[in-house]
Structure formats: C-alpha cells, structure tokens
Amino acid sequence: MARTQFMTAGTRDEMFCPQLPQAGRVLPPTKEKTDPGELTPLLESKKSKQPSVDSKTAEEDFNDNLPNRRGIGISIFKKIKMVTLLGLASTAFIVIMINPELSLEQYQICVSMKEPHALDMLHKEETTIEFLIHAPVLDADAINSTMRKTMPKLTITINTSEPWDLYLDENALRTGNQKAFKHEFSCCLSTHGGSYQIFFSTDWEESIPIVFSYHPLNSLVHEQVVLAAIILACVYFLIIFEIVHRTLAAILGSMATVAVLASLNERPTLEEIMSWLDVETLALLFGMMIIVAIFSETGFFDYCALVAYKIAKGKVWPLITLLCVFAGVVSAFLDNVTTILLLTPVTIRLCQVLDLDPRKILIAEVLFSNIGGTATAIGDPPNVIIVSNQELAEKGINFSSFTEHMVVGIVFISIAGYGLLRVFYRNVKLLQNQDPPELRELQQEIAQWRRAAHHIVVASREESMVRALLLQKVATLETLMRNQIYKRKARETKDFEASVEDLEKKCRITDYVLLGKSGVVIVLVILAFFLHSFIESMYVGLGWIAIMGATLLLVLADISDMESILHRVEWATLLFFAALFTLMEGLAKLGLIDWLGDQMGLVVSLVSDEHRLTVAIIAILWISAIASSFIDNIPYTTAMVPVLVKLSEDSRLNLPIMPLVLALAFGACLGGNGTLIGASANVVCAGIAEQHGYGFSFIEFFKIGFPMMLVTTLVSMVYLLICHVALQWH
C-alpha cells in the first residue's frame, strides 16, 4: 500500500524512541543544558558578574512568559479573523439563498415602418431596466455621424426614457447574422396602471426580426463598479498579508461576487458559473502535473541538475543566465505554464546542488518565462485571444504579422530585464542559503515526513498507528534539528571537481525504462502543443492534449498506485484557478473591466489629432499593464479587444489598429509579472515550490516582479513609440 511505503524512509530503531510523546503529538521545544566545557570565552569572563538571584529570577520569568504572551496575541488574532470571515461568508451565503437565479424569458417579434410594436412589461418598482437584444443591427457608437443620416434606424424606448437608437446592418439582415447588444434604461412607471411599456419603431419598410429579453435592476446597480473594486481590494488584502491561503481568499472573493450579483437581481445559475471556468487551462494543468509526477520518478531532473552544474562550472550567474534564456525561448513556442511545470523541479534540484536559495532563482525564471511568452502568438493566452479574434483577422492581424512586431520588441525588453536582474542579484551571497546544508536537509526531511502524515486518511486503526509513527518521526527529527542549531558548523567549501564527483554518485537516472516511455510521451505532447495552432484539422486544444498525454503515460508506466501520483497534483493551485476564473468573470459582469475600457476610450478621445496615437499607445499599454498585474489578463484581454476595434473604426479618431493591439499585448503579458497572481505561470511556480518546501510569498514576488514589470513596460513603450509613431511601421 502507498500509505505504508513512507516507513521505509527510516529504520525501525529511528521510528520508535523510548521518550517519544503520545501518538500524533509533536515534541515541544526543550531547553537545552549547555555543557560548561562549550562555553565561549566571553561567557566565561562574565562568570564573576552574575546577576543577583532576584534579578535573574525576574529576567527568567519575563523570558518564560514572553512566548505565552505572543501565543495569546496570535490566538486572539486568529479568533478575530475567524469571526470576521465567518460573518462575511455567512452574509454572502444568505444573500445568495434568498435571491432567485436569473431566468430570462425571451420574446420574438418583427418590426417594420408600417408595423411598430408595443409590449406591456410586468409591474415592477425598480426604475432601471436592463434590456438585451439580438438583431441585425449596429450600435450607434460604431457608426460615424455621416453614415447615421443614411442608414435605417431602429428605436427602442421604455415609457419616458431616453430612446436607444440602433442602425440596421443590411448585410447581416440578408445573411441572418444577429448581433447581441445590452442597454440600461432609467425610466419611471407609466401613469396607465403603473406598468412599463416598451415600444419598437423603425423607418425600414421591410420586417426586422428581433429577439429580446429584459429584467429589472435594483438601485445598487449604479455602484456595482465600486463594489467590484472593493471585492478585488479585499481579496488582495487577504493574499498580500497572508491572512488566509490564497486559494481560500479567491474562493471567498468569488462567493462575494456572486452575492453582489444576486443582490442586483442578476444571480447567475450554477451552469453559468461552471461555464466561467477556463476548463482548457485547468485540464492543461492537471494533465501536465500527472506527466511531471511520473517523469520525476526517473531521476531525470537530478541528472539535468548535474549537467547544468557542469555547464555553469559551478558558478551562479552563468547558471541563472542559462535558466532564464531557456525559460524565455521555450515559452515563446510552448505555453509558459507548461514550461514552468517542466522546469521548476529541475531548478529546485539544481539550486540544492549549488547550495542556493531556490526562491529567487524561481522568481527570475518565471519572470523571463512570461517575457518570452510575449514574443509569439502562441506563447501567452492574451496573444492567442488577439490572433484568434475574427474581427482583428479581417483587419490584417494574423500570426505572422503579429509575431513579427512582437519579437523585435521582446529582444530589447529581454536585454533590459536581464540588466535589472543583475542589479537585483548583484550580491551573489544573498542568493545562497544561510543555513548549513545539514540543517537544511533536516528541514526538508521534516517537511516530507509531516506531509506524508497529513496525506494519510485515517479510516482504520492501522492507518491511525502509521500516522502516529510518522508524526513521532517528525518529533524526533525536530529534536535533532534543535540540537544542531546550537552546534552549527561552518559551511564546507568544496572545489568544483570534488563537487562533481560527489554529485555524480547521487544524481543519476534511476529508471531507464520509465525514462524512455516518459520521454516519448512528453515529446509527442510538446509536438502536439506546437502543431495544434497550425493544423486546422486538429480539433483538440491544449487541455485535451495534456489529458491524452497523461492517460497514455499512465498506461505505458503501468501505474497501479494512483494515490501516490494524485498526491503530487497541486490541488490547491487548481482550486485557486477555478475560484479566480469565477471571481474575474463576476467582476466583468459587474462592469469593472468595461469601465476600464470606457475610461481608456475617453482619455484617447480628449486628445488632439496630432498626439492621439501617442496618447492611445501610452494609455492602452500602461492601463493594461497595471490592470493585468491585479486581475487575470485573460478576461481583461477578451473585454478589451472589442474596445480597440471600436476605437479603430471611429472615423473621428482615425487610429490604426496594429499599434493599439500591440500595446494591449505588451501590457497584458508583461503586466503579469507585476504580482504573484498576475499570470498563471506565477501561481503554478509558487505552488510547485511550496510543495517542495520553498514557497515564496506575495511580497517576496512583488519586490522583484513589480519593478521588472515597470522597466519592461517602459522599454516596450519606447519601442512602440519609435516604431509606430516616429517610423510608422504599421
């Protein structure tokens, strides 16, 4: 059984100790008695100056009570935190329960100049009505004033509200292509029976088919953007200060978003919420986690660490350069999440070999993975969204033209980013582990034993005994570690040849058969990842490819113990992404992302003609970079593409589409380096590092990632202004 295999990590004599605590308990810290022979000369010189008995007793009492006071303070904080979060979560649950799900009844009518249409709606007290329509029409904002005078018009009014004008698209009418539009009417009740009456009229002689629905909104609808911003700020507050785990923070934020939607009479159904999840990304993560879990059993990651150590000659900066360049180049042709999943275990093992702190190396690696993914149309999800958009494709933005403009900029951005990294890591000593290797190995061993104990589900007496034995082993190792803290030895420095000889004994391939099977599957998966964007007859996405690869490897490897493989899947990371997708889609429905787009369009429209393109590039780039640092760049890019199309089609602005799209791509992709949850690769890297005992916090990532985002965005701005304002490359 997999649950009992952990006992092989130590001998039976190590497992059973005569002075171990009760089963399942961890030994408390014990006061070590100092050997008089080990006293330092400084302490020996002060023997004659010992304090009095009373003062010594008072000092000991204070020191003994200090941990208790701290413990009481921590306990009070935890109780306040629990009560506060419990109250907020309960409130959200109650709001969701007392508000019904939104169920819209659709109406189908035909309107012509000779046959206008009127409809009495249900009696409602709300003064704001949200109206949704599907018809062969165009919005007034997409048409210039000259065309409006000649195009047939469809006018919709509710009671005495301002009329909503839409313009007939004759091509869409002939082809049956209906477009969806949404509008909010602010109106008052009719004097005839206190009801709402909706009225359709047109100056087109033929019939116009219309499908519409409506529902009332309460008075909070005007503050929904503010509520969305408050929810997002609260989620970041919980994550930044590590009040709760980031997964729980995202879950609480998504629940709060659904509760706000419910209070606005817009509560989504469970099926709609499930549709918000990016199943493609979740399937990609799950499949690749399974593949990496099996692949790691071959010893290949240890062997790669040894090879990289030889190439770098045991020096730190050649190693960092090698990892960053490799991560950037591979991410340009593969999804950067896949790159990080494969590269993070190798980096952690390599840092252990070089006696480096993996946290800072991993942060540098994931930053350059995001930079490299920006270079091509398949390296980062925002680029995929842009290139796959049909309206942008009709305007000449395809894979080759988009990649051509992006690659040149990424070369300069990578050089600037590498220079900034040299500044951050100029003191190589700070990259090294401060603890001696013996103590660090004990810490890792303790973490592994404790994780093994927590993974055992106690369903029988035997399983309870195994878990107790594992926790006893943890207690024994913790006691040994405390003893070593008082007897720290200086770090031994070995020459390069001796280190290589020592590593060759430890870092080797352990299963060549499994390595061959895993290698074949990984090569096929990576090849399919690369080809799926170019072969139109390949009707599977990245998620399907990863799941197929994981299934194939499970069959080839003849895995019988599924639990040991599933234990290595980062379930917390998958749940975090699921909650984050729900949170971001909910914020989008509350209008936060649309509000950002409207503000961007407002800024651009207020500028004079000669400076409009410059201001548009700067505004789109920096707003996208800052926004993508704090919200997921996938829904942001999806919402911003129609905004850019509208700006380019506005004849009054006269803006070319290519510079606007490039500014969006640079901002959305590079902005992901700003915070820990700004990009999917960041979260995946943090989850794997935490699984290996090297987790890094939001603040640790922010100190390096946010300045990197500012510098790289600044370089991309200079590049875009030179190429598309000064040189008019587009």
Image (spheres, rainbow, N blue to C red):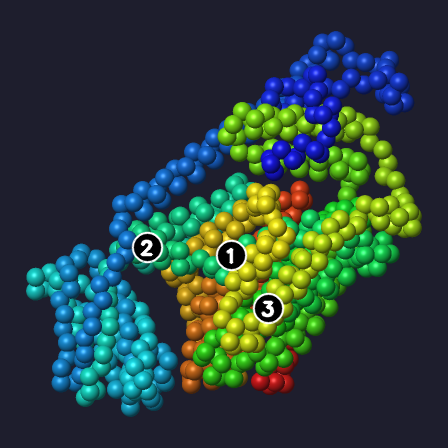
Give whichever of 98, 218 is nearer the camera: 98
> Label 3's element?
helix
Which mark is drawn over residue 18? none
Which sits earlier in the primary sequence, circle 1 or circle 2?
Answer: 2
Residue at 17%, 57% in the rendered image = 124
What kind of residue is marked 2?
Answer: Thr
The span from disc 1 to disc 2 (Cα, nearest Å) is 21 Å
Residue at mark 1? 282
Figure disc tally:
3
Give whichever of 154, 42 is nearer the camera: 154
Q: Position of residue 267 (x, y in %)?
A: 31, 54
Give whichever of 647, 409 is nearer the camera: 409
Question: Mark 3 or mark 2: which is in front?
Answer: 3
Q: Residues within 10 Å of mark 2 (few under 14, many from 20)?
A: some
Residue at 42%, 82% in the rendered image = 650
Q: Position of residue 600 (x, y in %)?
A: 46, 70
Q: Is residue 138 above or below residue 338?
A: below
Residue at 69%, 60% in the rendered image = 519
The span from disc 3 to disc 2 (Cα, nearest Å) is 35 Å
Q: Position of residue 366 (x, y in %)?
A: 65, 58
Q: Residues within 10 Å of mark 1 (few under 14, many from 20)?
A: some
Q: Is the C-beta separation of discs 3 and 2 under 8 Å? A: no
> Label 2's element?
loop
Direction top: furthest residue: 53
Q: Is residue 716 above or below residue 221?
A: below
Which mark is drawn over residue 528? 3
> Label 1's element?
helix
Q: Quadrant of the C terminus?
A: bottom right
Residue at 50%, 49% in the rendered image = 575
Q: Residue 330 lies in what quarter of the image?
A: bottom right
The span from disc 1 to disc 3 (Cα, nearest Å) is 18 Å
